[in-house]
Amino acid sequence: KISIFWFRRDLRLQDNTGLFYALQQEKNVLPLFIFDRNILDKLEDKTDARVNFIHDQITYLKGELEKKGGSLLVKYGNPLDVYKDLLDEYSVETVYTNRDYEPYARERDQAVEKLLKEKEVEFMTFKDQLIFEPDEIVNGSGEHYKVFTPFSRQWKDKFKELKFDSLSNPSWKNLYNPDKTLEMISLKEMGFATSNVPIPSPETSDKLIKKYDETRNFPAIDGTSRLGIHLRFGTISIRQLAQRAAGLNEIFLNELIWREFYMMILAHNPQVVDKAFKPAYDHIPWRHDEVDFKAWCEGKTGYPIVDAGMRELNETGYMHNRVRMVVASFLTKHLLLDWRWGEAYFAKKLLDFELASNNGGWQWAAGTGTDAQPYFRVFNPTSQMEKFDKNLEYVKKWVPEYGTEKYPKPIVDHKFARQRAIDTYKEALDR
Ligand code: FAD
């Protein structure tokens, strides 16, 4: 008999809750990863850097587990079908995994759990992705928060009291050692090709975190951690990062709390995936102008900070947070285009794409979200540039033709667009 530890978005061996307990409680643990076709088949870009990143990380984990006397079983398909085959092939006692809170993941896990139960296999899940799960931070009446500040206050109070289990030194001797080397599918066999987009390092210095509050708003400075992709796929531990952050800089810790806030909002309000958090905002008559949308995607709006951000995103899979706010506001307010278009474009391009934070960020900028930017506050892209990229370093890096004849004229006039946005929102909300 074997037990399985199922890796999903926790692709590390250190400080991994479910893996630690599987090895502590079971004798023959076979770790598993499934390249999920329900997700992969929807990706249009066959050189997607995130798929490359996961593939590299899985290859690395397999090698490390083999050095410890075990291995990693890698499958490709629909998870439910994979489990059906697996239960024929192996005699499985328990499946261990870390909990995942996105709507798709929950549905998948429920289906897998049902199948396992039918075969009398236990399914054990653990908290690992978050410090506090969606039900853990509630107000005095037991309700979920809708506003960030009181949520974060509670979060910090509870965090101070928290005792973290020591998960170092898992019992590696309990790994299952298969008779023959397990095969691993290549990127090519899954229909993907190598990407040349570099992945940011999983490390960040104490110095950067300490200075974060001074540097984080300036896109020309490397003043943020770039850990997003590592938090997304669990190649670093949120517990270790949050404990470090708490001792170094509260402003940085707040950002990690925003991540949990939006995960909580999504878990309790799964309708936000395609609807406004505030239903009245679904009455806004978005313009469905493909030409303006294309100009935005390509970074050809004639607003230098917007164009720089979009070009940074297209080239590197990253965009600085300050600029994400500016381009999202520009799309939804200046161009009056549907926030869902922007959200979908970011989802395709961002290395650190996270459904909860992306949806939260877009609904914040569009004014449709919980605790969002009020609709009548319309960022002025020119003053944002003057404030946060005074010397035009960021703009010149990404838009070298800025200031020449070749640079496009603004696709919309700021004053006109601002008024149009306010009037349109007001009319829709007064309905
Ligand atoms: P740092 O500034 O170093 O922050 C550290 C970590 O804290 C981040 O990696 C992230 O996990 C978390 N964090 C920081 N800011 C936020 C925030 N506002 N909301 C939630 N978590 C935060 N973040 C994503 O992780 N994935 C997304 O898909 C995403 N889409 C966004 C879309 C829009 C329109 C906006 C305005 C913001 C979005 N964000 C998203 C939030 C934020 O911009 C990024 O987390 C941040 O820029 C990533 O860079 P970093 O890793 O250097 O972050």
Image: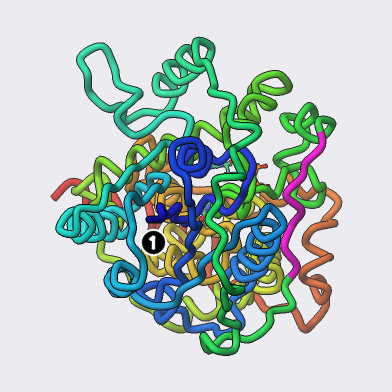
Give the main secondary structure of the magenta stretch.
loop
Q: Residue at x 61, y 29 (%)?
A: 242
Q: Residue at x 81, y 30 (%)?
A: 206
Question: Quick check: can you spot residue 27?
Answer: yes
Relative placement, left or right, of 100 versus 9 is left
Specify the quadrant that holds the N terminus: bottom left
Query: Label 1: which residue?
Result: 339
Q: Nearer the viewer, residue 197 or 123?
A: 123
What is the basis of the colouring in this image? rainbow
Relative placement, left or right, of 74 versus 383 is left
Relative vertical location of residue 277 with respect to residue 304 in this rendering, above or below: above
Q: Nearer the viewer, residue 41 or 167?
A: 167
* Number of callouts: 1
Question: Quick check: can you spot residue 387?
Answer: no
Relative vertical location of residue 335 with respect to residue 280 in this rendering, above or below: below
Relative vertical location of residue 95 with respect to residue 160 in this rendering, above or below: below
The amino acid on which the numbered mark 1 sits, given as a three-letter code, is Trp
Q: Residue at x 45, y 49 (%)?
A: 365
Indicate the secondary structure of the residue bearing disc 1: helix
Percent of width and height locating residue 247 = 70, 18
Relative placement, left or right, of 280 versus 211 is left
Percent of width and height locating residue 223 = 78, 42
Q: Residues within 10 Å of mark 1 (few under 14, many from 20)?
A: many
Percent of width and height locating residue 233 = 55, 54
* Cβ at disc 1 under 8 Å from ligand 1: no
Q: Identify the magenta region.
A: 198-205
Percent of width and height locating residue 30 = 49, 57
Q: Residue at x 43, y 57 (%)?
A: 333
Relative vertical location of residue 221 with respect to residue 294 in this rendering, above or below: above
Relative placement, left or right, of 196 versus 116 is right
